[in-house]
Structure formats: C-alpha cells, structure tokens
Amino acid sequence: MSSTPTTRRLPRSLLSVAATGTLVTGLLVAAAGTSQAATTGPCDIYAAGGTPCVAAHSTTRALYGSYNGALYQVRRSSDNGTRDIGLLSTGGAVDAAQQDSFCAGTTCVITIIYDQSGRNNRLTQAPPGGFNGPAAGGYDNLAVATAAPIAVGGHKAYGVFVAPGTGYRNNNTNGVATGDQPEGMYAIFDGTHYNGGCCFDYGNAERNSRDNGNGTMEAIYFGNIRVWGTGAGNGPWIMADLENGLFSGADPGYNANDPSISHRFLTAVIKGEPNHWSIRGGNAQSGSLSTFYNGVRPNKSGYNPMKKEGAIILGIGGDNSNGSAGTFYEGVMTSGYPSDATENAVQANITAAGYSTSGTGSGPVFTTGSSISLRATTACCTTRYITHSGTAVSTAVITSSSSSTDKANATWVVRAGLASSSCVSFESRNTPGSYLRHSNYQLYAQPNDGTSLFAQDATFCPQNGLNGQGATLASYNYPSRDIRHYNNLLYIASNDGSHPFDTSSAWTDDVSWIVSSPWAS
C-alpha cells in the first residue's frame, strides 16, 4: 500500500455535501432524521477518494451501492440452526424481518459479521489470547442478536451489543495495513453505551491475539477508561488504541482538545500514516465531523514507525482483553490515508442514512419516571407479579384486595438504565433507592451502592416478549440471560443452560412479562 496524498480532491459530486438537500452521486442528503434511498455507500465514496475499503462491516445497511449480499449470520439456541440476514434491496437497509422470523420464540446470537469489501475479512467469535474469554475453550461470547434494536432509514435494524466478555476477531486478513502503512477507519457506535473496561475497539490489531508491543495496533477506542490517556471532561472519549496505551493526542496522557462525546449515534474516526495520525468524530444523525487531534505520532518510544499487524477486532483489545462494553452498528477500514474531504462526504452519507431509535418494533415502551407492575404470562401464574419483601424478590399474587404494602412492593419506577440509557432500571416504589438487580443469577431489591457492578447488575434491556406477549428483559451484562420466574423466585436465566432455572420447559412464557398499570399510585 502507498499513501494517498491528503491534497487529493474528490469529484465535485462527492464534495457537495455541506448543505441540507445537496447531492452525493445520486444520494439526496435530506434533513436530519430523514433519508432517501441510497445509490452510493461509504465505501463508494472512499474508493472515489483513492482510499478504497479493505473491510466493511455492518448489521444495519449496505456500505456499497451495489452490495446485495448477507450482512451477518445468526444462530438460534433452540436447534443451533443458522441464517444469513440480508438486505431489503441492493444497496439498502437490512431486512430485519428475516431475523425476527428465524429467532421467534428463542434466543439468537450473531455468529458472523460479513465483510462487504469482497476480501472476506469477516468477523467471527474471538479466540483466547493474552486473556481468555468466558465461553468454551476461552473464546469470547457472541452478541445476542436482539439486544440493540434501532431503525435505519425508517427500517428496523439491530446493532452488535457488546457486554463485557463479548468479542469478534479476524487474525487472517487480506489487504489490511501492516507496519507503518497508511490506513483509515470509522465506526458508528451507541455513544451512551460504554464503560471503563479495556477495551471497546474496532480496527487493526495483532494477529496472534497477544500484546506484541508498542505500535502493533491501530484501532478506534470508545469509552471512559482512565488507565492511559484521556480527553477533556469525564468521558467517554474517542481515542486510538495503539497497544500499551490509549492515546488522545501526541502526549501519552491528556489532550484537552479531545472532548467527552456521547451522541446516541456516534461517528468515530481514526486514521494514520507515517508519523501522522488523526482523531475525528461527530453526530451520526446530523452535522459534520470535528477534528480532535491531527499531528505527529505519540511522543513515546515504539510508535514511530508503527508496527501494525493487520488483524481486525471488534469489542476487545488486541490481546483479547474483554472487560469493555459498547454497541457497534457499522464500520470500515481503508487502504491509504483518507482526506478530510472524503471523510466529510462519508459523514454526510451516514447522516442521510437515517439512524434512529424510533420505529424499531422493539417491544413495549418503558417511560422513564413512570410506575409500572410486571405480570407473569405463564398459564399457571397470570395473577402473579414481580414483588419484593425487603431485599427478597419473588412473584406473588396481587389483587385489588391486597394490602397497600403488598401493592407498593409490586410496583416499580422505571429509570434510565444505570449502566446505559439505552436500557432501563427498576427502582422500588416502596423502598426508594433500592433497585431490582441480580447477584449470582438471582434477583434482589438492593440499595444502589454507586458501583459500576451494581449499575450493570441493575440494568435490563427490553425486547418483544418471546411468547408474543409483553416484554422480555435481558440482563445488561449477561445479555444471553433474561429475567425469568422459576418456582416463584426470579433469576436471570439462559435457555437450556446448566442451572435448574435454565430449563427449556415453559421458557418463552416464563421470560415474557406484561407491563401493567401500577398497583400503587
């Protein structure tokens, strides 16, 4: 690979993107929040700028105007069957109905994220490396396919929800930059879903899943870890994971120009060439990109020249450190150092795509601040509600003749998820400050102690009820486990797992809950 000069100019049709309603080779850039059918994709724009994509991953839409293949593959737990999930039309949005139909009544995980570039740089379950993952053989977990519902262009879609322990990788890539060769990359993340674990990355990493020294990586990082470099404020920040350091600029520590940034849909950009690199970012729903750093490589030994190895990672660090959290929607890697003009045109294409949280069909709406009660749907138990007595949580029969205390104990206040505002937490109506949380798989009502672990344990992500009724509530930090009643107690359970409460008998009914009017006002 050779560097593309940053002064190279795009065709005029690809540069007219600054104003609402302008044209990008046939794509009308509509007002924020709306979109038109695309005839070009981000990778077409990169190619026109002389820096073609060598990897293109998305679970939401095509990244080339001519692409009409599968975006990703899912596997369902009921029979281990797999299904490729494709597009509604060539160059268009994902056909999420394929997934919904295939995964109805069971749990699906994302097994493959296909590469649209034609180089077969697909992402699959990350193997063990410097750190082992929690799955069999030390592999990382796979993402639950329904955990991050959104819409793109008005069509339902799903992102890749990375809880700690989840990760994807390809150690045998084709065409990805190595050594000090130039490259660029962008990703769209959920800017409200992050943590301080290492390391939620997308990009270039070691081929043996181990730490091979300074400069052997070049990946986008997003989160608020403070072990290495930081930006302004409390985070989260877009930084570069260059191995043995997360960098916000030339200084290995602090860069005041790298702001905390948390758009619901976030565009994050990293690019690098010999002794030069840049951080850029912006709102994936509207507006332009900002440059947060543009200058020389970090002033620490080992990063000039770089020693990139050319593997691709998602959701983990280069050595398979897997304590991170985040959500990924799309991203690419390029051959050559893209110009700002090229990236600005890509950003206009992204904002025109119409990323949104509305119209997802993702289940009942949980209104923050509202009081609700949660009723079981299993035939045996349709008069039973999730309730607590002190810290003990169970289901109990609640009727109009129940005591005021029992009614209050079966009432929960919906709060924005303590670990992610994309999900929810449930505060006790009768004991303010106490939340429904899991510990050792069982549910309790306990006071919020302010720790990150409590926040994660007390956060649940709603989706359509697996039996077609109400909502199923997946654990934020164990997204393959759902709130389930078993012998009148509450657990986070996994269909046909190793515990008695994981039994597949009555599974879909036991994990589906009707969101009812509160028993206590």
Image (cartoon, rainbow, N blue to C red):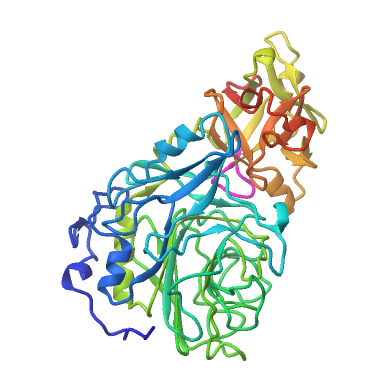
- Quarter assignment of residue 183: bottom left
Q: Position of residue 108 (x, y in %)?
A: 56, 40
Instruction: Please tell me which residue is depicted at 27% across the width and 49% down the height of the picture.
Output: 90
The quadrant of the image that shows the C terminus is: top right
Question: From what the image shows, is residue 314 above or below residue 516?
Answer: below
Question: From what the image shows, is residue 179 above or below residue 387?
Answer: below
Instruction: Please tell me which residue is depicted at 68% across the width and 63% down the height of the picture.
Output: 128
- Quarter assignment of residue 239: bottom right
Question: From what the image shows, is residue 217 above or below residue 511?
Answer: below
| Residue 429 visible in image | no
- Quarter assignment of residue 302: bottom right
Q: Residue furthest top?
A: 401
Q: Position of residue 409 (x, y in %)?
A: 74, 25
| Residue 426 visible in image | yes
176 vs 221, left or right, is left
37 vs 502, left or right, is left
The quadrant of the image that shows the N terminus is: bottom left
Q: Position of residue 473 (x, y in %)?
A: 61, 35
Q: Position of residue 80 (x, y in %)?
A: 58, 39
- Residue 417 falls inside the magenta stretch: yes
Question: From what the image shows, is residue 484 above or below residue 166?
Answer: above
Residues in magenta, as a range: 415-423
Closer to the camera, 18 or 177?
177
Closer to the camera, 475 or 407?
475
